[in-house]
Image (cartoon, helix red, strand yellow):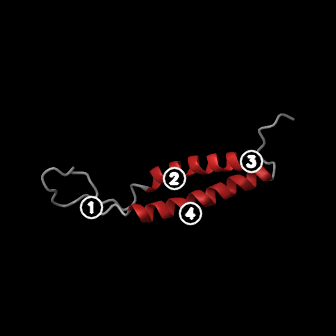
Amino acid sequence: MTWVQGVVAYVIIWWLVVFAVLPFGVRPVAESDIGHAAGAPENPRLWLKAAITTLIAGAIWLMLYALVRSDLISFRQP
């Protein structure tokens, strides 16, 4: 795996994980003001979710890298 392939794989994994992590802990505002969406979260904690996403994506990427380096998964023809 070249460094470009590694970066592309990490970015794809990160975006897949972020969409899985975003709904965790979301609570809508009890009483919304005029002009605010009824389903908008009260405290989205996006920095925490970004940090969690980065850690999970890093772990998944390391597993992918280990599989590719060990030749258990190969896209080359025999």
Labels 2 and 1 touching (C-beta < 8 A): no
Residue at (87, 35) in percent of width and height: 78
Position of 59 relative to 9 (above/below): below
Name the kind of residue labelled 2 in the image.
Val
Residue at (57, 46) in percent of width and height: 12
Labels 3 and 4 touching (C-beta < 8 A): no
Labelled disc at residue 55? 4
Name the kind of residue labelled 1 in the image.
Glu
Which residue carries the number 2 mark?
Answer: 17
Q: Position of residue 26 (x, y in %)?
A: 33, 59
Q: Earlier in the sequence, mark 1 or mark 4?
A: 1
Eye-nearest disc, 3 or 2 = 3
Q: Earlier in the sequence, mark 4 or mark 2?
A: 2
Q: Residue furthest right?
A: 78
Within-10-Å neighbours for mark 2: few <14, some 14–19, many 20+: some
Q: Earlier in the sequence, mark 3 or mark 2?
A: 3
Residue at (68, 56) in percent of width and height: 63
Within-10-Å neighbours for mark 1: few <14, some 14–19, many 20+: few
Name the kind of residue labelled 4 in the image.
Leu
Q: Quadrant of residue 42?
A: bottom left
Which residue carries the number 3 mark?
Answer: 2
Name the kind of residue labelled 3 in the image.
Thr
Q: Position of residue 31 (x, y in %)?
A: 15, 59
